[in-house]
Each structure stands twice: as C-alpha cells, then as structure tokens.
Image (spheres, rainbow, N blue to C red):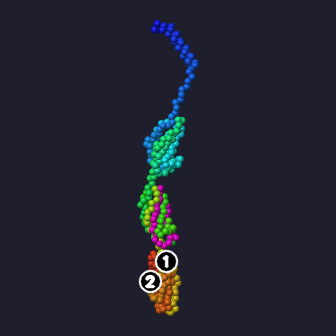
Amino acid sequence: MNRFFTCQQSWKVLLALGSLLVMGCKHPPDFQVAPIPIEKPSSIVYTPNSIQVEEGTTATSSVPVIVGENIVYRSVRSTPVVSATGFTIQADGAIKVAASVPAGTYVLDVILTNAGGTSNFPQVFTVTVVNTTDPVSNLSYSVNTLETELGTADSSVAPSYSGSTASSFEIQTSPSESEITINTQGKIMVSEAVPLGEYTISVTAINAAGSREFPSVYTVKVVDIPPSGLSYNPNSLSLSQGSGGVSAIPSVNGTNLSFSIANNPDPGIIINPINGQLTVSTSVPSGYYVVDILVSNSNSSQTFTSIISFQIN
C-alpha cells in the first residue's frame, strides 16, 4: 500500500473537508454558553479599623477594601444602638459619624448586598466618641464677701474658674433665702427684699462634663442702714420750771435705730429709746440744757452733739 497520497488524492481530501466546513457554517450546532454566577460579597476590610471622634463633631472612616462586585445595597448598625442618622455608610463604603452621636464606644456591623446575596460583616469597625469637656474646677470670687444695706439690691462680681465654660450655675444659701439668686455668668444677685443677716453661699457650676459644687465660696451680709441726719423741729424749747414738756419726734435716716442721751445734762431729761422723743420732767431745775444724742443700730452708731436745747425758766 502506498503510504503517501497522490496529488490528485490530496485535492479530493481538501475538497471534502471544505464541503464539511461550509455545511457546518450553514447549520451551526445548537448550544449556549452558561453565564458565570455572581458571588455575594465575601469581605470588607477597613484600614485602620477604628476611629476616635470628639463629641459634637463629624468624622469619616477610610474607604474599605471590599471583595464583591456590583454592590446594590449597603447599611451599618451599631452596638449600642444610636439614631438611624448617627452612623451612615457611603457609596464607597466609608462610614460617616454624625455630630449627634453621644460619647461612648460603638462597634459597627456592615451589611452588603449584590445580585449574589446579602452578607453581614460583624464588628468590622469601632468608633469611640470622647467628651473633651473638662469639668469646672477652682471656682472663686476675687471679692468673696458682699455687704449691702437693708433694702438695697446689689450683686457680686463674676467668678473665675478652670475647665470648660459653665452653661449654668446654682446656689445654696445658709440660712435659706430665695431672694438671693445667681445668673448665667455666676454673679450672685441680692434683691432689696433680703432680710437683715449673714448668708453663706455654696455655688454649683454645670457644664457638659457634669456639675460640681464649691461649698461656702461666698458670703452676703445685709446690714442696717447707718444712722444719719438726725434733727428736731423745733430744736430748742423754752419751758417753765416745774411744768415739764416733750420735744417733737426727730427725723432721722437709718434702720432699726435706738436712741440714748450721750452727755447726761440732767437726770430729769430722758429719751424714748425707740423714737428719740425727749421728755423734760417737772423736777428739772431752772437752767439751760444742751443735749447730745447717740443713735445706734447693728451697723454703726453716731453721736449728734448739741442737737437740741432746753431753756428752763
């Protein structure tokens, strides 16, 4: 048998193969290529996987590396739970922290969904929100005593202190007195209705870090109005010996006053200690008498010399 095709045989073989190829193109085989299935997200990695945020500010994490394509839905949930707007996840996977999130540590889970399914990635990110507010400390008043006269309104200076700004103040008075108050700057306000007395005051300062009490940091003393302006009208009297007589009640400034004779002109001339009216008894001998009056209260005392005279004939 001849091992080699003749030239004529070779052409016959090529013609036969060409015919088969043409027939195959006209009648392609009946088959389809199966689509490659999409797998659900398999991992998400944040680098770094935690962030620290000051309370009241916003922050955003780094963009994570996600294994999974065509993500159509993404969400984040926290432990402990905060409002729905506290933590949100952006289209690129970065996590945004809202300013409303209170101080604390939050562990976050991320949920990703694509056509292949939904994957939950627990504890993939941690957010620590810190309160950088310092509590109020070292509160003091440069002048820590207020002395005011009865019936007069007054106030202290504002205090100095360390720490973050106080949002409000409270006071406790001993003895208790509702007419002593404190304003938002820490000034102690004394109304004209505060009774006579001495009051020890403790102040509580409040800010975002909490409240702190500063005991006995201030003293309010409400004192009597000192005596002044004593006068008698008339300021001289002429009396017959043995008849006796009384002066007018004097006018005077001051509160809670008491009156006494300072120079003892004669035992028969006496004074009402409450209202300052003088009485000349029938026993006072003839003569000319000049009277000095001492007026006193808890605040001070004053002597009014030669304030009134009596001529006894």
Q: Is residue 202 above or below residue 77?
A: below
Q: Is residue 9 above or below residue 205?
A: above
Q: Give the range drawn in magenta.
A: 182-208
* Residue positioned most to the top: 1
Q: Is residue 226 left or right of residue 26?
A: left
What residue lies at 49% left-to-right and 42% top-to-bottom? Answer: 110
The answer to if 194 sits in the magenta stretch is yes
* Residue positioned most to the left: 138
Q: Mark 2: give few (<14), some (14-19) or many (20+) Cα within 10 Å.
A: some
Q: Where is residue 226 in the image (x, y as percent from the top left)?
A: 47, 75
Tag shown at residue 114: none
Q: Where is residue 267 in the image (x, y as percent from the top left)?
A: 45, 88
The answer to if 56 sits in the magenta stretch is no
Q: Name the residue under label 2.
A: 262
Q: Nearer the viewer, residue 186 or 246?
A: 186
What residue lies at 53% left-to-right and 12% top-to-bottom? Answer: 15
* Residue positioned most to the right: 26
Camera sees residue 255:
yes
Q: Earlier in the sequence, mark 2 or mark 1?
A: 1
Camera sees residue 229:
no
Q: In this view, does 203 lie above or below 257?
A: above
- SS at circle 1: loop
Q: Is residue 146 left or right of residue 16?
A: left
Which amino acid type is marked by label 2? Answer: Ala
Q: Where is residue 93 in the image (x, y as percent from the top left)?
A: 49, 40
Q: Work out how far the residue at label 2 is from the one at label 1, CA to CA, in angstroms.
A: 19 Å
Q: Name the residue under label 1.
A: 256
What residue lies at 46% left-to-right and 80% top-to-bottom? Answer: 295
